Image: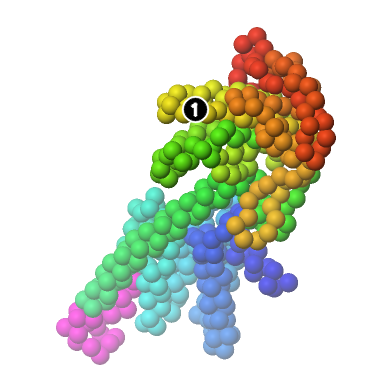
Amino acid sequence: MVKAALKTWVNAGITPLASENINPIRLTNIVAILIIAVSLLQLPTALFFWDDAAWYELQIVLGTVILLTFVPILNTFKAYKTAKLFLILVYSIDIFLSCLLWQINLNIQYFFLLAVFICPFFFNNDEKNIMNALLISLSLCFLGFEIWFNLPLELISQSLHQQVFRLSCASLFALSCILCSYHLWKNVNRSWQKLAEEKNRSERLLLNILPSSIAQRLKCSPTLIADYFEQASILFADIQNFTPLCKNLSPKQLINLLNEVFCIFDTLTQKYGLEKIKTSGDGYMVAGGLPIINSIHATQCCHCALDMQDAFDGISQKYHLHTGLRIGIGCGEVVAGIIGKNKFSYDLWGEAVNLASRMESHGLCNRIQTTESTYQLTKAYFRFDKRGNVEVKGVGRVTTYWLLGRKNNLETHVLFK
């Protein structure tokens, strides 16, 4: 129970998906616990030396402990800056009152300089002015008590010169602490900035590999992901006679051509809200209706297929290519997910996937072949030409249709439901 309570305290105000082990919010909560622990260690001494001063010290300790419990509460309500300032204020008041209470030089004032070294871990670049003000204020508090404790020469045996030298050393020490703290702040913020940049880069890389919802699930629970979809659409596109084309182009020219083609296809995929699944050689596979379910997946795929065909025609004319694009579309139930543990990818399985692949491989150059199910779902929006029965390997004879174009200048903008 104690371990769970401490974990709740330390993680107060931090989102469950946060992956950083160290950040200013968590550090604020941890420092609050450490100050409480150190303050409570004074209680045995206060009880042993029970007099009026010790009684007040006990009140200071208890007040500090009670006030610091508000730090994680403030962080929970996302008042992060207020929590940091409140923590430093309570800590400073504790030291200030203790110095006034005992009225002798117990070196308690050096705890002000400890706060000077802690501040750099709390504040980012946007809070630079606040941190500088705190560093100067804490150092002045330290110097103020140094002067107060050492100024009355009649109460101490040292000469004026010795006291001036002592105060000069204390001033230099405080100045050194400020400079070191500022240098530490710059390095800490630079490290956190680099860490944030690397995290964002990793996030973008992960989102380029996996759908956003799947990536979030994988980060929260790295287990097998397999989802069943009653209806989804799958589109396969392939460049006709790609192998002979490879012989006429250098490797660099070939890669540049494929990159240009697939970049355009990626743009169209995003435009119509489809999910790119993978590329294999000159093949391109996308799906609609997953991982987020919608009812217009077939329409989205048909729009995308027509634009892909037009885009590839433009590229063929640009590079004087004597080839074309075969596209196949199919609809049906699929299972989508991630398997394995190394170099994994989001993939689809099911008869609808195999049939869509056969629509592409059994199609013709510069034609879009669809299944009966795709035709039934989209015939109100697109023009089709019935091809008839086609012998499909592993399936048998299947009725297919050629997708010719949009009906009545149908707008390509797709409204998501």
- Quarter of the image containing the N terminus? bottom right
Is residue 44 depicted above or below 272 in this figure?
below
Q: Give the residue furthest to the top.
A: 408
Q: Position of residue 278 (x, y in %)?
A: 61, 44
Residue, x 59% and y 44% (percent of image)? 280
Is residue 366 depicted above or below 231 in this figure?
above
Q: Residues within 10 Å of mark 1 (few under 14, many from 20)?
A: few
- The answer to whether residue 412 is visible is yes
Is residue 312 depicted above or below 220 in this figure?
above
Indicate the quadrant where residue 102 lies. bottom left
Indicate the quadrant where residue 295 lies. top right
Q: Which residues are magenta?
A: 142-166
Residue holding disc 1:
322
Residue, x 77% and y 38% (percent of image)? 393
Q: Give the residue furthest to the right.
A: 396
Q: Is residue 266 magenta?
A: no
Q: Looking at this view, is 58 or 284 the one in front?
A: 284
Is the stretch drawn in magenta largely helix, strand or loop?
helix
Q: Is residue 148 magenta?
A: yes
Q: Position of residue 270 (x, y in %)?
A: 57, 33
Q: Position of residue 167 (x, y in %)?
A: 24, 77
Q: Looking at this view, is 9 or 282 the one in front?
A: 282
